[in-house]
Image: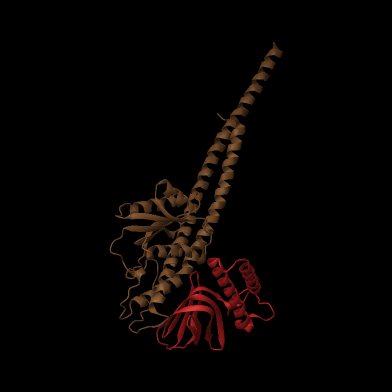
Chain colours: A red, B brown
């Protein structure tokens, strides 16, 4: 039985199509889903969601959300999500630097702000690492990624 | 009778205004289209979240009902989340939705408080002595989910703390460019039976019978999903309302442009008549003068 996967955020459908395997960052640990998996419902943590189809693997950064698994369909509802191939490395670097600078200027005593900033830093670090590790070679002929023709 | 100069400047100012309204009309039309697309983009997530909620509630042997899904015995205090615009120049858009909300809840046997989104709605409610719980103004023109998630959180927190027994959402549903209708949706407690209103087509998937594996636990999952879904409904309502606002503004501006066109035509007719009249008078003067001179010379 083929497995279908759908990845959606609140404002966008990120991915939809047949897959061989889904590797997801569950809140209790990374999990791989193959066809005919038992029904499962789980929350997601910070991490990289990978969708494998043949020799092709697509990666998405995910920050929170949940995932529903049925024998023939995996539905990922992410709070924040982004296709790794679409991450703009320069902007991600800038965001990380900004978060680090901001984090230094507040003390842990200002709990709300501190947590928010820490989250922002975690997210930007995650994006950078994901972009370095999981970007497909086809999307990066030179050092810098071209912005067009990434889909295919 | 105004002078020719006054009339000329009046014509110029009216046609300047019509240029502005025509530009606003074009901008609003494209914004309405964009907001409409933004609404459409939220539907996959909404449909799937709804589906997951349905699965959860249909699980065999579910004894525990989540507080966010539990109807309270008495609804003494009602919270209404009212979505309006920040700006005017959009016909009756703002007043329609505010009036609709006030009428809808006028007969309620309960205290009604409002969370208002949009400056116009706040002003109208304050004038009508509505009870304000909170206000959110100055939303970005193209909001993303993170911009409005606080509104949903506020509703959920107030509901859970027992401050309110029911939460409703009032917004303007975008039907098409010419038609927008105010609507009410019950936000909390979430009613799983009624189909959630604007969530389209979730009947296609009917996986039932087999029990789920939960990670971490069923309660924790519901704790996450229900507030998320509530916030999403607010987000969708805001996008719908924005599409409606832009559409209403487009129509209002088109009417204004047409009125200006008519006014310019009428003014120009008056102006030309006056101009012709003054030329005729001048000619008569000259002719009369020449005639007088000729008679004087002949005598």
Please tell me which residue is depicted at 50% across the width and 66% down the height of the picture: B145
Judging depth in this view, the residue of B38 and B19 nearest the camera is B38
Q: Is residue B97 left or right of residue A91?
A: left
Q: Is residue B46 left or right of residue B278?
A: left
Please tell me which residue is depicted at 45% across the width and 85% down the height of the picture: A3
Regarding residue B57, the answer to whether it shows in the image is yes
Judging depth in this view, the residue of B278 and B202 nearest the camera is B202
Q: Is residue A134 left or right of residue B171?
A: right
Q: Is residue B26 above or below residue A3?
A: above
Please tell me which residue is depicted at 55% across the width and 52% down the height of the picture: B24
Regarding residue B236, the answer to whether it shows in the image is no
Image coordinates of residue B199 in percent, x first then y, are: 40, 69
Task: Determine the image quadrant of residue A94.
Answer: bottom right
Which quarter of the figure is the N terminus of chain B placed in? Answer: top right
Task: Determine the image quadrant of residue B188.
Answer: bottom left
Judging depth in this view, the residue of B168 and B87 nearest the camera is B168
Q: Is residue B72 above or below residue B9?
A: below
Image coordinates of residue B263 in percent, x first then y, are: 52, 40
Image coordinates of residue A108 in percent, x first then y, are: 57, 69
């Amino acid at each position: 039985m083929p497995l279908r996967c759908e990845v959606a955020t609140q404002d966008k459908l990120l991915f939809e199509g047949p897959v061989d395997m889904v590797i997801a960052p569950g809140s209790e640990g990374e999990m791989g889903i193959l066809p005919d998996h038992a029904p499962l419902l789980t929350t997601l943590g910070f991490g990289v969601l990978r969708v494998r189809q043949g020799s092709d693997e697509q990666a998405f950064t995910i920050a929170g959300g949940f995932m529903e698994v049925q024998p023939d369909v995996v539905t990922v509802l992410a709070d924040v999500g982004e296709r790794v191939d679409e991450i703009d490395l320069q902007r991600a670097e800038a965001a990380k630097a900004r978060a680090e600078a901001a984090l230094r200027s507040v003390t842990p005593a200002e709990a709300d702000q501190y947590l928010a900033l820490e989250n922002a830093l975690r997210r930007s670090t995650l994006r950078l690492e994901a972009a370095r590790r999981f970007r497909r070679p086809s999307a990066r002929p030179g050092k810098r990624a071209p912005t067009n023709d990434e889909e295919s | 009778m105004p002078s020719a100069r006054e009339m000329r400047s009046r014509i110029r100012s009216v046609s300047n205004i019509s240029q502005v309204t025509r530009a606003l009309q074009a901008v609003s039309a494209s914004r309405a289209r964009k907001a409409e697309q933004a609404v459409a983009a939220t539907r996959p997530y909404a449909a799937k979240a709804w589906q997951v909620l349905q699965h959860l509630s249909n699980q065999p042997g579910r004894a525990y009902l989540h507080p966010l899904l539990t109807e309270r015995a008495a609804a003494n205090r009602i919270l209404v989340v009212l979505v309006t615009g920040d700006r005017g120049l959009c016909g009756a858009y703002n007043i329609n939705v505010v009036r609709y909300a006030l009428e809808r809840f006028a007969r309620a046997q309960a205290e009604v408080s409002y969370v208002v989104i949009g400056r116009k709605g706040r002003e109208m409610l304050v004038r009508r002595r509505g009870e304000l719980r909170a206000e959110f103004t100055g939303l970005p023109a193209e909001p993303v989910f993170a911009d409005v998630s606080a509104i949903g959180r506020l509703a959920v927190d107030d509901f859970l703390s027992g401050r309110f027994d029911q939460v409703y959402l009032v917004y303007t549903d975008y039907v098409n460019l010419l038609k927008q209708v105010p609507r009410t949706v019950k936000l909390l407690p979430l009613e799983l039976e009624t189909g959630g209103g604007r969530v389209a087509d979730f009947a296609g998937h009917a996986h039932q019978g087999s029990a789920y594996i939960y990670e971490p636990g069923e309660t924790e999952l519901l704790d996450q999903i229900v507030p998320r879904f509530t916030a999403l409904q607010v987000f969708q309502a805001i996008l719908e309302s924005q599409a409606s606002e832009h559409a209403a503004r487009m129509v209002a501006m088109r009417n204004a442009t047409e009125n200006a066109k008519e006014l310019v035509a009428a003014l120009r007719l008056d102006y030309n008549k006056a101009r012709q009249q003054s030329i005729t008078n001048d000619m008569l003067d000259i002719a009369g003068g020449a005639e007088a001179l000729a008679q004087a010379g002949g005598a």
